[in-house]
Amino acid sequence: MCQWCDKYAEGYSRWYFNPANYARKLYKIRKDEGPDLEPNPIVAGGMSLVKQDFIEALDRKDHEAIAKHRHDIEQLAWRVHFGQVVTLEDTLKVIDFIYPIALMTCACRRSMLGLPDEENFTCMGMGPGMYKWERWPDTYRGGLQFLTPDEAKDAVTKMNQRGLVQTLFTFGTPYLGGICNCDYPDCSAIRTTIDFGVQFLWKGHHVAKVDNDLCNGCASCIHRCQFKALSFSATQEKAYIDQFQCFGCGLCVTECPQEAISLVERSSLPALANVW
Amino acid sequence: MLPTITVDYKKCLDPLSCRKCLLICPTHVLGLGTRVGPRKFKEIYRSQFLVAGVRFEKCSGCMDCVNGCPNNAIQVSF
């Protein structure tokens, strides 16, 4: 069971299908609640929780210090700002009941690639906070583009086709305020999670599974995985998915021309039901 | 082994326009940060962006950024 569903689903099948989680704690991150972090160029792109001493501990393989750093970062992130991978199908369902939705520029890609605003509209904000987003000039860079539900669905679907993973982010948990469209290595959430083993981004409610009888080894799925879970078996000439590493986004599924990859419910697999 | 990546900000003046080092780095180590951070009602100007070795744990020491910087502003040492 996903612990966020446990706490915040309130009868809905997933916590992110509960409309209350898009309104309840609206922008209630108070100063004493949020992280007290000094601006520092070295932690650009949302890496502010990963500090130099954590990276040094990883470098010298100080497992005790590593565990403590991971624990501290996760506790703070889960209270204030963390994400979960969602399938395109689930994202479209969320868009059906959330309004307004606005497209904005991605802070991660601005930071890691210096991407010009006009090429960088991949981030989506949700909820009434969008009406006053200009209060935050740095994230308002390039302006906002308000979308109708159909336009939002179209935008998300196109980004999914491009190979970007859909993720939902809290802003003062459980308040969900953003649909991000991420890819490795420039998304700091994926990078923090994959590179540092910090559970900043939670796996989704599904797991991908290859049907070896249907897979013809065309390898067109291989580039789709952003989580280092998908590789190609040279011996078998088939796609191989490490299900324990799979985040269940479904990007490989939609790319497979043979329909050889399917998404199964995480809860249906005993060994994976609690792997988040 | 972790590197020390230093950028001479007297030489690197407009990284948001240049971004050569950001695009040249094979492991996406370099990033753009600021010393002011996101603040309510506060604009961050282009001139306030600074290049830094944000993901320095992934630096292999290839020196592509050092050699590729048109202003000779980056130094990497181990």
Image (spheres, coloured by chain):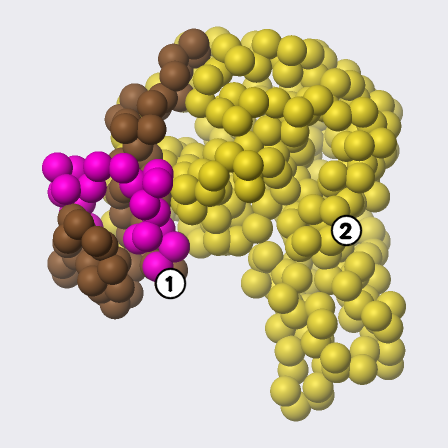
Q: Horizontal and vertical percent for residue B21? A: 30, 53
- Which stretch did the figure color magenta? B5-24
Mark 2 chain: A
For label 2, the SS is: strand
Q: Residue flagged by tag 2: what amino acid is it? A: His
The residue at the point 75 percent across, 25 percent down is A147
Is residue A2 left or right of A215 when viewed as pictured?
Answer: left
Is residue B28 left or right of A94 when viewed as pictured?
Answer: left
Instruction: Depth check: give the residue in front, A38 or B29.
Output: B29
Is residue A82 left or right of A35 when viewed as pictured?
Answer: right
Mark 1 chain: B
Residue A206, numbered circle: 2
Label 1 in the same subunit as label 2: no
Q: Residue flagged by tag 1: what amino acid is it? A: Pro
The residues tagged by marks 1 and 2 sit, at their Cα atoms, a distance apart of 32 Å
Color of chain B here? brown
Q: Nearer the viewer, mark 1 or mark 2?
A: 1
The residue at the point 74 percent across, 79 percent down is A218
The residue at the point 86 percent across, 81 percent down is A213
Q: Which chain is yellow?
A: A
